[in-house]
C-alpha cells in the first residue's frame, strides 16, 4: 500500500514538472506590439486609461496549489516567498504577453549607438535624449537605461502613498511635485543634468509643506546630487546632502531608502554590479485593470488585491548588486529585473548581509499611450519581516492626472533654495 502511495505521489510530481516545463517551452513571447497613440475609447478630459486588451482571458492562475511547479523556471525568489507567506491570498493571474511599450518617435530617432560610461560607471557621456545604451553589454548599462528612460519633460502632479499594516490599518500621505527633465529630445541639455524636482508634502497636516529640492547630474562622481529641504516649523531652507543612498525618509516608516525611489536612482559607487543575463520571468505588465479600479478596492492586508493585477511572461535583464568591501549601505545585496523593451525596473529583491530575503518589490507598468510612455502605476514594497507594505507614487483613476509635458515650461530659476521656499508656501 505504501509503495502504491509513493508511486502515485511521484506520478503527480512528475506530471506537474512536465506541465511547468511544457508551459515554458510552448509559450512564445511574440514580437513587439507597441501602442504609439491613444486608443479609441481614451478620453483626455478624464484620468482614465482604458484597457487596450479588454477581451484577453486569464491563461493561467498560479496560487498555493501549483506555484512550486514554476519555482525553477519563471518565478523569482521574491514571488516564491510571497506565495509561502500568504498562501491563502497571494496569486498571479497570467495573461498573454503583449509587448506594448513605446516612447515618442523622437527618442527612437536619436537612439543609434551606445553612450559612454565614464568615472567608473558614475557618469554617461555621448548621446543625449535617447535610450543611452540600445546595445547594452554590462550591468550598469541596464541601470542607466532605467534611470534615463523617457519620463516626460515638464511635469506637474500629485500622488498619494500608503503604509498598510498586517491588521489592515494604514497610514495615508500625499504630496505634490514639479519636475524638469533634461534627458529627452525636447529640452536642450547642455548643463550635464538629468533633471530637477521639487516635492512638498500636502498630507498629513503635521507635515504639510515639508518640502525638498533635488538636482540630479549625469555624473555623480563629478557633480554629486544637490538637495535642500524646507522645514515649515522654522521656515528655513537648509542643505540636505544625506538625501541619498540608504537615507530613509520618515514617510516610508523605514520600509524604503532614498535610492529606491523610482526603482533605483542616484550614485552607484557602493556596489559591485553584475549582469545575470536575459531571463524569462512573470512580471506585472499592462496593469490597466488595476489603474481603473478604485483604490479602496485595491488596498488590503499583506499585499494589494491580486485580482486586479495582470502578469505576463517577460524577457528581463537581471542585474545583481553586492556591497563593495569597505562601503556601507543597509541593503548589502539587491537583485533587479529590467524590462527588455522599456528598460523600466519591473521588480526588485533586497537581502541582508546573510543573504536572507528582506523585501520584494513590484512596479506594474502601463503605456500612457497619450504620450506615449511606459511607466509604473505604483511602487509596491513588501517587507517580508514585518508583513507591512508601502504603496507609493500611486497613479490611479482616483487621482488627478499627472501632466507629463506642460505647454509652458517651468522656469529654471524656480529650482533654487529661494524657489523651494516659495513652492512650499
Image (cartoon, helix red, strand yellow):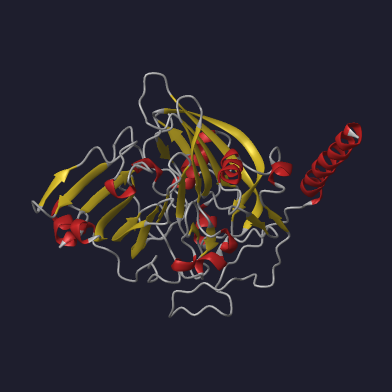
Q: Position of residue 352 (x, y in %)?
A: 45, 29
Q: Is residue 418 left or right of residue 344?
A: left
Q: Residue at x 76, y 52 (%)?
A: 28
Q: Nearer the viewer, residue 124 or 232?
A: 232
Q: Position of residue 8 (x, y in %)?
A: 88, 40
Q: Nearer the viewer, residue 410 or 254?
A: 254
Quarter of the rendering containing residue 76: top right
Residue 312 vertical position relative to residue 68 in the rendered view, above or below: below
Residue 328 vertical position relative to residue 27 in the rendered view, above or below: above
Total numbered circles:
0
Q: Is residue 33 left or right of residue 339?
A: right
Q: Residue furthest top?
A: 326
Image quadrant holding the N terminus, namely: top right
Q: Is residue 399 left or right of residue 104?
A: left
Q: Residue furthest front?
A: 1
Residue 397 vertical position relative to residue 90 in the rendered view, above or below: below
Q: Position of residue 298 (x, y in %)?
A: 49, 63
Residue 142 visible here = yes
Quarter of the rendering containing residue 277: top right
Q: Nearer the viewer, residue 319 or 335?
A: 335
Q: Residue at x 8, y 51 (%)?
A: 234
Image quadrant holding the C terminus, namely: bottom left
Q: Position of residue 150 (x, y in %)?
A: 46, 55
Residue 413 visible here = no
Q: Residue at x 18, y 55 (%)?
A: 420
Amino acid at each position: 500500500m505504501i509503495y502504491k502511495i509513493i508511486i502515485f505521489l511521484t506520478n503527480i510530481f512528475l506530471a506537474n514538472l512536465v506541465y511547468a516545463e511544457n508551459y515554458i517551452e510552448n509559450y512564445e513571447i511574440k514580437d513587439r506590439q507597441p501602442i504609439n497613440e491613444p486608443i479609441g475609447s481614451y478620453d483626455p478630459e478624464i484620468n482614465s486609461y482604458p484597457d487596450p486588451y479588454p477581451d484577453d482571458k486569464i491563461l493561467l492562475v498560479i496560487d498555493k496549489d501549483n506555484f512550486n511547479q514554476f519555482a525553477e523556471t519563471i518565478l523569482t525568489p521574491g514571488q516564491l516567498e510571497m506565495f509561502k507567506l500568504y498562501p491563502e491570498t497571494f496569486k498571479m493571474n497570467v495573461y498573454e504577453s503583449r509587448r506594448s511599450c513605446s516612447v515618442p518617435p523622437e527618442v527612437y530617432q536619436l537612439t543609434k549607438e551606445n553612450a559612454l560610461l565614464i568615472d567608473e560607471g558614475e557618469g554617461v557621456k555621448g548621446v543625449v535624449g535617447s535610450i543611452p545604451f540600445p546595445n547594452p553589454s554590462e550591468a550598469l548599462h541596464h541601470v542607466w537605461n532605467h534611470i534615463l528612460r523617457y519620463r516626460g519633460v515638464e511635469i506637474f502632479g500629485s500622488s498619494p502613498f500608503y503604509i498598510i499594516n498586517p491588521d489592515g490599518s494604514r497610514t495615508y500621505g500625499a504630496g505634490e511635485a514639479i519636475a524638469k527633465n533634461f534627458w529627452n529630445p525636447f529640452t536642450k541639455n547642455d548643463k550635464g543634468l538629468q533633471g530637477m524636482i521639487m516635492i512638498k508634502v500636502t498630507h498629513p497636516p503635521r507635515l504639510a509643506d515639508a518640502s525638498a529640492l533635488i538636482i540630479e547630474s549625469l555624473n555623480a562622481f563629478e557633480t554629486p546630487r544637490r538637495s535642500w529641504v524646507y522645514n515649515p516649523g522654522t521656515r528655513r531652507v537648509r542643505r540636505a546632502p544625506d538625501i541619498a543612498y540608504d537615507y530613509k525618509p520618515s514617510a516610508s516608516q523605514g520600509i524604503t531608502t532614498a535610492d529606491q525611489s523610482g526603482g533605483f536612482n542616484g550614485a552607484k559607487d557602493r556596489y559591485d554590479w553584475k549582469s545575470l543575463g536575459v531571463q524569462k520571468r512573470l512580471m506585472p505588465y499592462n496593469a490597466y485593470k488595476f489603474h481603473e479600479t478604485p483604490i479602496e478596492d485595491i488596498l488590503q492586508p499583506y499585499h494589494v488585491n491580486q485580482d486586479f493585477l495582470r502578469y505576463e511572461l517577460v524577457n528581463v535583464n537581471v542585474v545583481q548588486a553586492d556591497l563593495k568591501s569597505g562601503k556601507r549601505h543597509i541593503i548589502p545585496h539587491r537583485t533587479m529585473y529590467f524590462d527588455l523593451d522599456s528598460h523600466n525596473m519591473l521588480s526588485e529583491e533586497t537581502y541582508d548581509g546573510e543573504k536572507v530575503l528582506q523585501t520584494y518589490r513590484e512596479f506594474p507598468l502601463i503605456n500612457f499611450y497619450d504620450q506615449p510612455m511606459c511607466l509604473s502605476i505604483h511602487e509596491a514594497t513588501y517587507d517580508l519581516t514585518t508583513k507591512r507594505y508601502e504603496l507609493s507614487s500611486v497613479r490611479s483613476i482616483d487621482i488627478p492626472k499627472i501632466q507629463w509635458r506642460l505647454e509652458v515650461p517651468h522656469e529654471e530659476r524656480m529650482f533654487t533654495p529661494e524657489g523651494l521656499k516659495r513652492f512650499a508656501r
